[in-house]
Amino acid sequence: MTPQEHQLLSDFLNRLAAVDKVAKDPEADVLIHQRLAPLPDAPYLLVQRALLLEQALEAAQQQIARLQQNPPHADGPGFLSPGAVPGFGRAPSQAYVPLPGAAPAAPVAPGGWRDRLFLSLIHI
C-alpha cells in the first residue's frame, strides 16, 4: 500500500467511525448481515470499491469543472449543433421561411391521410 492509499483508507475509516447511529431499514440490515456473514473478504472489497468510486467521482467533478471553465471551441458547427442541418434544430425565432417564388405546398384533401387511405381502399 502506498502512503497516499494509506491516507485515503485512514480518512475513509475515520469518517466511517465518526458516524453516529444511523436509521437502518431492518429488512436491508438483516439481508446484508446474512449475505456478508459467509464472506470474510466482503468488508475489504466494499471499502476498496467505495474508495475507487470516490476517486472516480472526484475525477469526474474535476473534469466537469475544467470543461465549464474552458469549454472546447469548434471551428464550425458541430455534428449535433442546432442549425447544422437546415430545417432541424431551429429555435422558434428561426422559424422556416420558404424562399420567395417557391411553389406552395399541395393542398390537403379534407379529412386527413387516414380518410384518403380508407376511401382509396373502398374504391379498389
Image: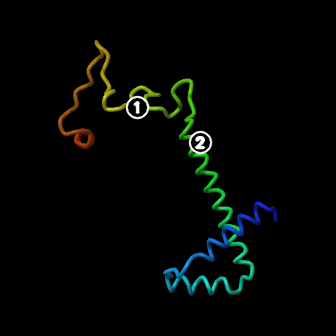
In this orientation, which residue lies closer to the viewer: 93 or 19?
A: 19
In this orientation, which residue lies closer to the viewer: 35 or 119?
A: 35
2 up-or-down from 60: above or below? below
58 up-or-down from 70: above or below? below
In this orientation, which residue lies closer to the viewer: 64 or 80?
A: 64
| Residue at image point 50% right, 34% down | 80
Residue 104: which quarter of the image? top left
Colour scheme shown: rainbow
40 up-or-down from 59: above or below? below
Q: Are marks 1 and 2 in contact (CB under 8 Å)?
A: no
Instruction: Give the alpha-carbon distance from disc 1 to disc 2, as whole Å.
Output: 31 Å
120 up-or-down from 17: above or below? above
Q: Quadrant of the C terminus?
A: top left
Residue at the disc numbered 2: 66
Q: Amino acid at mark 1?
A: Phe
Residue at the disc numbered 1: 88
Q: Position of residue 73 (x, y in %)?
A: 56, 29
Q: Earlier in the sequence, mark 1 or mark 2?
A: 2
| Residue at image point 71% right, 69% down | 10
Decide if residue 111 is on the left or right side of residue 63: left
Q: Position of residue 48 (x, y in %)?
A: 71, 68
| Residue at image point 58% right, 51% down | 61
Residue 45: which quarter of the image? bottom right
Q: Residues within 10 Å of mark 2 (few under 14, many from 20)?
A: few
Q: Position of residue 51 (x, y in %)?
A: 67, 65
Q: How many marks?
A: 2
**Residue situated furthest left in the rendering:** 110
